[in-house]
Image: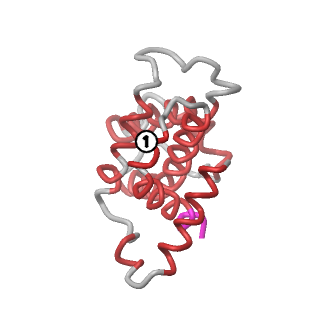
Amino acid sequence: MEKLNLIKELSEEALSAPNSLQLFVNTEDSEKEFEPISKKLWEFIPTEGSVPHPRSKNKWLEKYRVANNLLRDLYNNGLGNKANHFRQFFYPYGIEHFYLYDGQGCVSNRQMEWLEEQCEPIFNDIMFNAFLEQSEQGNISNLEFNKLTNILVKLFVSVKKGEE
C-alpha cells in the first residue's frame, strides 16, 4: 500500500507540472514504453498453465497472464480461438458487445480497432496491479521498483485517464 501511495503522489505531481500533457499523451508505442514492467512480470509466469496461487496471493498476476493470452488471440486470430473466454474475462470491465464476423469466425477490422481501444486501459490497470502485487510480496526488489518508478507513474496516469 505504501508503494501505491508513492505512485499516486508522484502521478499527481507530474500531472500538475508544466508540460505534463506532453509526458502522458497516449502513444502508439505504449507497449514498448511499459515493456520493462511486462518483462519483469513474465519472470513470475510459468511457460504453461496458471501461476501458483492464482486466486489468492497472485490474483493480479494470473489476470495479467490470461489477459495477455486473450489479447494475443485478438491480434493474431481476430478471436477465432478464444472469443467466448474473451467475453467472459472482459465482460466485468464493460466490454460485452462485439460479434464474430459472419463466415470467418473472427472480429472485423473495425471491431478489432474498437476492442484495442477498449482493452488498452483495462490491460494497463491489470499490469499496474500485478506489478504492485508482486512488489508488495517482495518478489520485486526496492531497487528494481525505484528504477521503474517513472514508468509506473506513466502507467498509473494512463489507467486514470482511461477511467475518465
Of residues 137 and 160, the one nearer the viewer is 137
- Image coordinates of residue 75 in percent, x first then y, are 35, 41
Q: Residue at x 51, y 56 (%)?
A: 121
Q: Which residue is situated farthest in the front direction here? A: 143
Residue sitting nearer the eye, 148 or 89: 148
The x and y percentages for residue 126 are 55, 44
Quarter that holds the C terminus: bottom right
Q: Position of residue 154 (x, y in %)?
A: 44, 61
Left or right? Give the position of 108 relative to 128: left
x, y percentage for residue 152? 46, 54
> Which residue sits furthest right?
56
The reply to whether residue 135 is in sight is yes
Q: Residue furthest bottom?
A: 18
Q: Residue furthest top?
A: 48
Is residue 157 shown above or below 16?
A: above
SS at mark 1? helix
Identify whether 89 is placed above or below 150. Answer: above
* Magenta stretch encompasses residue 112: no
Q: Main secondary structure of the magenta part?
A: helix
Q: Which residue is mark 1?
A: 143
Question: Is 14 on the left or on the right of 78, as rendered?
Answer: right
Identify the residue at image location x=44%, y=33%: 41
User: Total of numbered circles in the picture?
Assistant: 1
Residue stretch rendered in magenta on the structure: 160-164
Toward the viewer: 6 or 115? Answer: 6
